[in-house]
């Protein structure tokens, strides 16, 4: 070989360095799970770039609740979830709900707020239909989902439109339900029992049936029971169903997030559910948390997940006492994690009232894709009176009806630095 044909020693060294770098990069890519390659263009760290109160949507529910055209419809509720129907309507689902009348101010204490009687009827769940134009039209007969047994009730959580069965052309609404049973402190809001799925027909929204998909009664410690359905996400023919533990709901510490998955069209088939055990998917209902360390990292008992291109973003009330009004977020390249955060937080605005500012708490942030668009994420959150006695809390929210209604914020996500 001539001198012209031989590479120079310096050039050979450069090539060796480049080859070594490429080999290392390949090793790193092989070592990372396929859906957790944080350098992939489809997945990037995300955080809240800006946010503001969505007074327009908050006002819609205030006006609907105050409207006394009918006296058997929704006047307030929490546990706010929504799903867009194929014909463009939006179905809103609520947990504990006040019906009856709302009176114009001043209220019984002379304060300038609309109010309701303390003996106003309350049901365990309800559903409100929003028209294609965005007007709240009517409340379905409440409760929509009957109690499964004495001293037990059902709270609706995430809902979605899916095929009646995998591959079917007929669509139905599937609503995930949390079943709870009455108890005393610290379980003043009931002990977790099971996750169920209700099927509603379209377009008339008639409840066709309810099936149990995850029985948690064999789990002796109520703090370790997982209820699924606080939020869902779609990817590659699967519905990912997120759930969590309660961790003594009365004291508001950090809870753990879990995840299951179900093929599209099979939410009502318990045998189709798969649970993440920390390493793989399986049919054993026992799962491992994907987020939560019992301290700084964790979720409230209700949280929400949105998809921003290739990144999953989870919104929750902040862990511990900070979470009384503060919404924070985590991000991940996969529903199973790892979840990174907590990221930048923001304060959920409370009704403008000095007593409310002092003694109320925000909870249950939920995303509403039917209201978003143009890069915006619309979140609702619920507001309630801080009191360990449900009867006292109910009396306070009756004195000021703005408390027990969903409030909304609109936000935008951006790359985290």
Image (tube, helix red, strand yellow):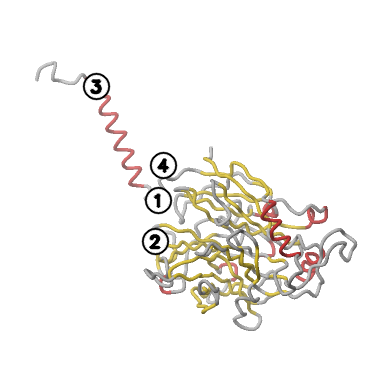
How far apart in space, not on screen, are marks 1 and 3 (Cα)?
Answer: 37 Å
> Mark 2 highlights which residue?
237
Label 2 – label 4 distance at C-alpha: 22 Å
Q: Which residue is mark 3?
A: 11
Mark number, residue 158: none
The reply to whether dot 1 and dot 3 touch (C-beta < 8 Å) is no
Q: Which residue is mark 4?
A: 41
Marks 2 and 3 close (CB-CB < 8 Å):
no
- Percent position (x, y) of residue 361? 72, 57
Mark 4 or mark 1, earlier in chain: 1
The disc placed on residue 35 is 1
Q: CA distance from mark 2 to mark 3?
A: 49 Å
Q: Residue at x 44, y 59 (%)?
A: 278
- Residue in front for this viewpoint, 122 or 315: 122
Sequence-wise first label, 1 or 3 = 3
Q: State the residue in front, 12 or 265.
A: 265
Q: Nearer the viewer, mark 4 or mark 1?
A: 4
> For residue 185, which quarter of the picture?
bottom right
Identify the residue at image location x=42%, y=45%. Answer: 42
CA distance for labels 3 and 4 = 32 Å
- Say which of 190 and 51 sits in front: 51
| Label 3: which secondary element | helix
Q: Is residue 332 above or below residue 23?
A: below
- Label 4 sits on a secondary structure element that is loop
- Looking at the image, tell me whether mark 2 or mark 3 is earlier in sequence order: 3
Q: Position of residue 230 (x, y in %)?
A: 56, 63
Q: Nearer the viewer, mark 3 or mark 4?
A: 4
> Would you say 23 lies left or right of 74 here?
left
Q: Nearer the viewer, mark 1 or mark 3?
A: 1
How packed mark 4 is, by other alpha carbons closer than 10 Å (few <14, some 14-19, many 20 or more), is few
């Amino acid at each position: 070989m001539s001198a012209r044909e031989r590479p120079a020693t310096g050039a050979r060294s450069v090539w060796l360095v480049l080859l070594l770098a490429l080999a290392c990069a390949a090793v790193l890519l092989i070592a990372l799970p396929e859906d957790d390659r944080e350098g992939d263009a489809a997945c990037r760290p995300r955080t809240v770039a800006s946010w503001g109160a969505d007074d327009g949507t908050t006002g819609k529910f205030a006006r609907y609740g105050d409207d006394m055209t009918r006296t058997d419809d929704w006047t307030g509720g929490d546990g706010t979830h929504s799903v867009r129907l194929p014909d463009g309507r939006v179905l809103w689902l609520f947990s504990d709900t006040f019906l009856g009348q709302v009176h114009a101010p001043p209220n019984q204490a002379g304060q300038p707020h609309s109010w309701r009687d303390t003996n106003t009827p309350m049901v365990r769940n309800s559903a409100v239909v929003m028209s294609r134009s965005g007007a709240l039209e009517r409340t379905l007969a409440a409760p929509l989902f009957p109690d499964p047994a004495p001293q037990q009730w059902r709270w609706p959580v995430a809902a979605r439109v899916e095929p009646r069965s995998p591959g079917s052309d007929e669509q139905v609404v599937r609503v995930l339900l949390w079943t709870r049973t009455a108890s005393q402190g610290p379980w003043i809001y009931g002990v977790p029992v099971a996750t169920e799925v209700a099927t509603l027909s379209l377009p008339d929204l008639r409840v066709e049936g309810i099936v149990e998909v995850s029985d948690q009664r064999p789990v002796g410690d109520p703090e370790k029971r997982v209820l699924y359905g606080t939020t869902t996400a779609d990817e590659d023919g699967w519905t990912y169903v997120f759930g969590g533990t309660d961790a003594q709901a009365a004291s508001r510490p950090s809870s753990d997030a879990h995840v299951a998955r179900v093929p599209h069209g099979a939410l009502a088939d318990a045998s189709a559910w798969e649970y993440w055990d920390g390493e793989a998917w399986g049919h054993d209902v026992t799962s491992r948390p994907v987020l939560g360390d019992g301290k700084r990292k964790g979720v409230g008992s209700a949280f929400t997940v949105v998809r921003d291109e290739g990144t999953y973003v989870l919104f929750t009330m902040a862990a511990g006492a900070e979470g009384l009004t503060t919404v924070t977020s985590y991000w991940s390249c996969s529903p199973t994690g790892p979840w990174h955060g907590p990221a930048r937080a923001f304060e959920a605005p409370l009704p403008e009232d000095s007593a409310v500012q002092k003694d109320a708490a925000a909870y249950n942030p939920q995303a509403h894709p039917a209201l978003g668009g143009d890069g915006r994420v619309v979140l609702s959150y619920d507001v309630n009176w801080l009191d360990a006695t449900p009867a006292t809390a109910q009396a306070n929210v009756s004195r000021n009806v703005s408390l027990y209604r969903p409030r909304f914020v609109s936000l935008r996500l951006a790359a985290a630095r």
